[in-house]
Amino acid sequence: MNFLRKPWLIVLIVCLALVGAVSAQDETAFCDNLSISSADCELYLRAFSNPFNSVAFDLDMSMHYDSDTFGDPIHMAVVGTVSIDPEVRAELSDPNSDIFDSPIQALQQAIGAVNTRADIAIDIPDWSSDGYSMVPDRLRIGMALIDSVGYIDFSDLHILAPDEIPDGWYGMDIRPFVPIIFGQMNPFQVQPDPSVSMNMMYPLEGFEMVRLPDVMIDGRPAAVLQGDADLGAIYNGVMGDAYRDMLRDMYAEMGVSPAQSDALIETLFAMYENMTMSMISIIDVETAYLYTLQVDIDMPFSGETWERLFGPGADMSSFMRGISMTMTLEMRDHNATAPATAPEDAEIIPFTEVMPLLLGRDSG
């Protein structure tokens, strides 16, 4: 049951999977399968591929378990900004750019091009703290990436374990970790089998979209598009076969064995079986900038789902009947957001102090 304590991992897996399915689709096939006009579909696709140099964002997520044991939902709010060096972004957007001749260095350069800071607040219900009195009702964490240095504010985490977790802001240059993590692997490229690319040209079954009445955002007209997805229908069709092959290729590049990758894929697809998703996208009709994305996910767990996840006899549907999640992302000030600044009182940890720990030796 430990996975129930990590709901955001489930959300991340689900969202990445759906985004991967849509983005991998041939544009014509995707649009032809929807009842909206080709112009509306083009606007929708532009909104999710539209480059920007900076933006301010507000992310709100709530996860609720359909269970007699778990009561209040877990809630997380994130407020922050992101800016990207336009020249580096342009290079990374060009698949023929010389920057990819050295993929590890390219990733390090990409990290240096991103400037972001976020304040995270997590509301922790009583049932998730296991009666541990030191766990606060709300946990705040600050995170930032400035000039290739990653920062974390440990202040609230320090309260949980004062002897083990430091207090305040700490930072570390993360570029030296890139070659350690990726080794000889190209972090930018996974080459799918040609048959996978052919399957991506089929319409995306189980996904429908309608355009609702327009709204005004900051004095500008914005289109409202609602998409509804039946994940089970999507991944049990031709798209599912293509996505399985794509995941196998990805796992192979990561060094995962075929048996392990098949087990991971089947676990993922078991969660999709009865899952539905509804998305509201609010998009500037002129610039195609995304203002709002609201995602509602409903994931019921049947006895069959439990057994596919954990094996025969693992039916726990009487205890846990499902999970529902709502995520709302608001984005404003596209290309007009000032770059974030590094925390003034942060202590920078040299890589030389961390390297012995990675090698299994005491840094002292």
Image: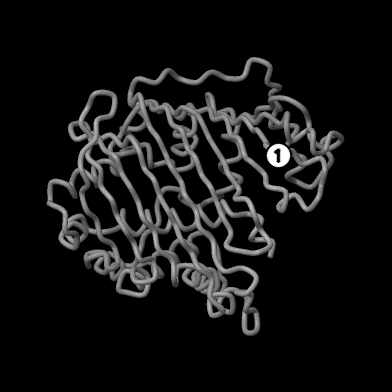
Residue most toward the bottom?
Answer: 312
Q: Residue sitting at 82 percent across and 38 percent down?
A: 161
Q: Compared to 33, does 279 lie above or below?
A: above
Picture coordinates of residue 277 (x, y %)?
A: 39, 58
Count of numbered circles in the view: 1
Callout 1 environment at 10 Å: few (<14), some (14 to 19), or many (20+)?
few
**Image quarter hosting the C terminus:** top right
The image quarter containing residue 294 is top left
Q: Compared to 219, does 285 lie above or below?
A: below
Q: Residue sitting at 73 percent across and 44 percent down?
A: 358
The image quarter containing residue 31 is bottom left
Q: Is residue 362 left or right of residue 233?
A: right
Picture coordinates of residue 179 (x, y %)?
A: 57, 43
Q: Nearer the viewer, residue 352 or 225?
A: 225
Which residue is label 1 attached to?
Answer: 137
Residue most toward the top?
Answer: 344
- The kind of secondary structure element at disc 1 is loop
Q: Compared to 311, does 28 lie above or below?
A: above
Q: Nearer the viewer, residue 156 or 178?
A: 156
Q: Is residue 191 left or right of residue 73?
A: left
Q: Is residue 257 left or right of residue 201?
A: right
Mark 1 residue type: Asp
Is residue 217 something one can see in this rendering? yes
